[in-house]
Image: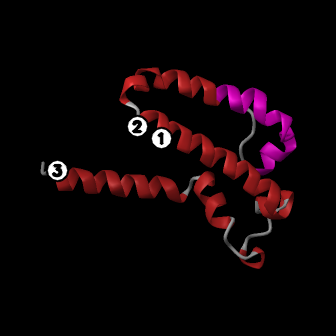
Amino acid sequence: IPIPVVSGVFLFLGRKLMTGNTFFRRISDAFAEKSRLEPKNPIYLLGRKKMNFYTAIQVLCLLGLFGFKQIPSITIFFPAMIGILMSIRAFVLPNFFSEEEFVKLQDPTPE
């Protein structure tokens, strides 16, 4: 199988998965007019500032992972970074957001 075909399949699958992802939807909603959003959008439920704060934290975590991956000498500790992200979600973010706000952001805490 030619490499461009395989690359095209992965590109298609990645694009298809991004359409239903709430993270990417919140990023696009941050730049949309409020009147064009559906009524149950987190912007209406929490406000633009709170939703953008949560999305900015997620973007910073993603950039941190990407930066961590770019340094070859420490990439062996990548699983530890995933553990750090889990700790941020479990212990740091509840200081800024209530469980009700997590549910409105469509990111409830697992039981």
CA gap between label 2 and label 1 equals 6 Å
The secondary structure that most of the magenta stretch takes on is: helix
Res. 66 mark: 1
Q: Amino acid at mark 3?
A: Ile
CA gap between label 3 and label 1 equals 24 Å
* Residue 111 in sight: no
Which residue: 81% across, 54% down? Answer: 50
Q: Give the mark count.
A: 3
103 in magenta: yes
Residue 65: x percent and y percent?
A: 51, 37
Span shown in magenta: 86-105
Res. 41 mark: none
Above/below status of 2 relative to 32: above
Instruction: Locate the C terminus by quadrant.
Output: top right
Q: Secondary structure at mark 3?
A: helix
Above/below status of 94 relative to 7: above
Q: Secondary structure at mark 2?
A: loop
Q: Secondary structure at mark 1?
A: helix
Res. 70 mark: 2
Pointer 2 with pointer 1, Cβ within 8 A = yes
Neighbor class of circle 3 (other Cα within 10 Å; few <14, some 14-19, many 20+) is: few
User: Which residue position is annotated with label 3?
Assistant: 3
Query: Closest to the observer: 17 or 58?
Result: 58
Residue 17: x percent and y percent?
A: 47, 52
Which residue: 55% across, 27% down? Answer: 82
Give the mark nearest the N terminus, 3 or 1.
Answer: 3
Query: Closest to the observer: 13 or 31?
Result: 31
